[in-house]
Image (cartoon, rainbow, N blue to C red):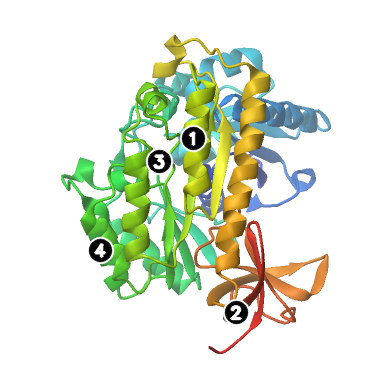
């Protein structure tokens, strides 16, 4: 490699979703296995890796800004620092990025994690240019044997059960760069869960682009119920297991039954619906309507009456009228939601909706987003109030500087980072990663407050 000694201290910036975080952990794991020291502060690093996101316009802008900041960081010691761009933006727009940002020293697409050290250690451009033409849909799949340096707290981990997606949602470009659905085998996933339990992880969050699609490429038409049962019966696994990203229309009776009869899977439903008006959903190429979604919730609540329920919605999709938006707000007002993400539509190339006219003005999109977020907050507050007087199992994560006498954690129906928190009065001495029983005494939108109890 032209006699240039490899850099040996690396820092990483991970942007985007938890699925990207797993990729970041694999990149760091590969570097650490090959002798690199991982540091948190870029000022103490020789190499800075930016793992980018390319989902929507705001995510791309954030990724480009991070790459520009990294290029500025490099100029402090241009002879001794290197910047590596990685992830979805490289996979989706690698050729364009390379033309526009010659100061970047190396490029890692989604299938290039195995070559991380080669790209990081090679002088600028060498060995990377040939990799970029493969920046169409990714095809790779990692295993539990691949080295990995987790970025989550010691008690929690993300477990990616599959890569890619077979859905053709009109607003989403992910299949064009993440590729088709590729499921990890049950044996491989069981091995990862066992490893996590050995490391002291008590909470495993199962993630995918479409978790209900797990196993289809392996010849299993409804594989997620079998996965739930296998994980529940595994000899060694974290005590709390949570499933994210269920796809409406694929929630079978078998899956509901498996979740209702489990000891390890927590009471949690993550069901991104995107809209409720049938015409908008048809334009989105999504199944169902407000009525079918209400039936989904009714089925799930009968089987899991105590579950925390999360969803996600898009406002401002092409052609969305006031009447269609009103149908969405009416639906959300009656939905049993503890939390929901609200997003404005982003007009994306390589999607089915790109041929439509992006005709909802930006100011209208933002107004509708605010209206729906306020409504979600009201609904979540109502749900939170119903939990006052109940006792919940809470995973302690630390303290809040503004609440020095209290501990902060999450109950089983709250996922990391997105769903809110539980404040435990007089709990400052509780150890992060421990689980305690808490009687809920107060409620606020996305926040519960309580005290330790034995009941």
In the rendered image, the vertical position of residue 129 relative to residue 78, given as above or below: above
Crowding near pointer 4: few (<14 within 10 Å), some, many (20+)? some
Tell me where residue 290 sits by quadrant: top left
First in sequence: mark 2 vs mark 4: 4
Q: Of the residues tagged 1 and 2, which is closer to the observer?
A: 1
The image shows residue 38, relative to residue 278, as above or below, that is: below
User: Residue 142 in the image: x percent, y percent?
Assistant: 37, 46
Which mark is drawn over residue 328? 1
Q: Is residue 141 visible?
A: no
In this rendering, which labeled residue sits more in front, label 2 or label 3? Answer: 2
Q: Which residue is mark 3?
A: 209
Who's the residue at 58% across and 55% down the image? 380
Is residue 24 left or right of 134 when viewed as pictured?
right
Q: Considering the numbered disc 4 on the image, is that residue within a helix, a strand or a loop?
A: helix
**CA distance for labels 2 and 4:** 28 Å
Taking 24 as reference, is 250 left or right? left
Q: Position of residue 448 (x, y in %)?
A: 64, 67
Residue designated by label 4: 257
Label 3 Cα crowd, 10 Å radius (few <14 / some 14-19 / many 20+)? many
Q: Residue at x 50, y 69 (%)?
A: 201
Instruction: Estimate the spatial distance between the alpha carbons at disc 3 and disc 4, rounded to whole Å.
Output: 23 Å
Q: Residue at x 42, y 56 (%)?
A: 269
């Amino acid at each position: 490699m032209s006699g240039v000694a490899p850099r040996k201290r690396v820092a990483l910036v991970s942007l985007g979703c938890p699925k990207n975080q797993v990729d970041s952990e694999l990149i760091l794991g590969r570097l650490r296995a090959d002798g690199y020291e991982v540091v948190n502060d870029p000022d103490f690093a020789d190499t800075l890796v930016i793992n980018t996101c390319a989902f929507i316009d705001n995510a791309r802008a954030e990724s480009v800004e991070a790459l520009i900041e990294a290029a500025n960081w490099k100029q402090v010691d241009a002879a001794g620092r290197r910047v590596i761009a990685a992830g979805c933006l490289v996979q989706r727009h690698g050729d364009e990025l390379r033309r526009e940002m010659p100061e970047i020293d190396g490029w890692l697409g989604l299938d290039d994690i195995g070559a991380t050290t080669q790209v990081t250690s090679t002088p600028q451009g060498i060995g990377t240019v040939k990799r970029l033409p493969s920046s169409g849909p990714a095809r790779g799949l990692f295993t539990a044997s691949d080295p990995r340096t987790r970025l989550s707290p010691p008690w929690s981990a993300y477990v990616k059960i599959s890569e890619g997606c077979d859905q053709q949602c009109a607003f989403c470009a992910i299949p064009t760069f993440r590729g088709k659905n590729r499921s990890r085998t049950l044996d491989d996933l069981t091995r990862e869960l066992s490893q996590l339990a050995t490391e002291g992880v008590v909470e495993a969050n199962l993630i995918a682009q479409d978790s209900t699609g797990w196993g289809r490429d392996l010849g299993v038409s409804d594989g997620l119920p079998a996965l739930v049962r296998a994980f529940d019966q595994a000899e060694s696994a974290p005590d709390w297991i949570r499933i994210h990203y269920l796809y409406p229309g694929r929630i079978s009776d078998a899956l509901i039954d498996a979740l209702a009869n489990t000891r390890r899977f927590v009471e949690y439903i993550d069901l991104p619906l995107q809209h409720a008006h049938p015409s908008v959903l048809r334009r989105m190429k999504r199944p169902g309507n407000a009525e079918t979604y209400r039936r989904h919730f009714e089925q799930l609540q009968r089987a899991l009456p105590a579950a925390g329920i999360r969803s996600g919605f898009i406002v401002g999709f092409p052609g969305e009228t006031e009447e269609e938006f009103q149908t969405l707000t009416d639906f959300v007002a009656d939905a049993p939601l503890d939390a929901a993400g609200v997003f404005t539509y982003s007009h994306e190339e390589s999607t089915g909706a790109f041929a439509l006219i992006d005709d909802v003005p930006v100011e209208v999109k933002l107004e509708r987003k605010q209206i729906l977020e306020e409504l979600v907050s009201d609904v979540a507050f109502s749900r939170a109030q119903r939990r006052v007087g109940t006792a919940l199992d809470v995973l302690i994560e630390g303290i809040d500087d503004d609440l020095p006498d209290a501990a902060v954690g999450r109950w089983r129906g709250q996922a990391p980072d997105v769903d809110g928190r539980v404040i435990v009065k007089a709990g400052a001495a509780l150890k992060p990663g421990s689980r305690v029983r808490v009687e809920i005494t107060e409620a606020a939108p996305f926040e519960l407050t309580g005290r330790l109890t034995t009941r």
